[in-house]
Amino acid sequence: MAGVGEVATDRPEGVPRRVADRHTRRMSDRTDAAETRETHDRLNLFERFVEVSTGVVSRAPFFAVGVAVVVVWALSYPLWKTTTKWELAIHTFTAVLSLLLLVLLENSGRRHTEAMQEKLNVLAEGLSALMESQAADDPELAEAVEKLREAVGLEGRH
């Protein structure tokens, strides 16, 4: 509460205005980033397909289906006129399946890596803000804050 003749401020007592202003600006930036993430969390059709496919492919039943396909292929040898066509069938099937799985898993891995990087950035921002709030009296800590922000690449985000 501000008394008579005092200006109301939202900053905690003892925290310099410059640090409080930066912290407030960072919190509003983080809110904007969170809103952006929420709109990006709505997956498009391909990304939903990737999520479902990754869930199915990464489970044991998919491996069992793969083994069953190979067993059926091996047992179908007498049905083929030539060994070459019999081999070509499994090679074509596995090549196409491998390519599709590669694309799906790469997409999934990229999105997981981006999510992990965003979490690390938020942690680094929080640590930097905490250090900066304590750095008013300690020049070494202020220097460490700058090194952290430069090393992580946070200086370009604010």
Image (tube, rainbow, N blue to C red):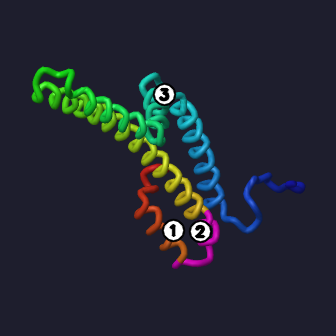
Q: Is 86 placed above or below 34 here?
A: above
| Mark 1 residue crowding within 10 angstroms, few (<14) / some (14–19) / many (20+) | many
**Res 131 label:** 2
Name which of mark 3 and mark 1 comes first in the sequence: 3
**Nearer-the-camera pick, 66 or 154:** 66
Residue at point 45% right, 27% down? 49
Name the residue tied to disc 3: 48
Q: Is 7 placed above or below 138 here?
A: above
Q: Is residue 66 magenta?
A: no
Q: Is 14 placed above or below 21 here?
A: below
Residues in magenta?
A: 130-140
- Tell whether label 1 touches label 3 (CB within 8 Å): no
Name which of mark 3 and mark 2 comes first in the sequence: 3
Number of on-image labels = 3
User: What type of secondary structure mainly makes up the magenta span?
Assistant: helix
Q: Is residue 131 magenta?
A: yes
- Horizontal arrangement in the rendering, residue 86 relative to residue 3 (left or right): left
Residue 149 at what x, y percent from top left?
46, 62
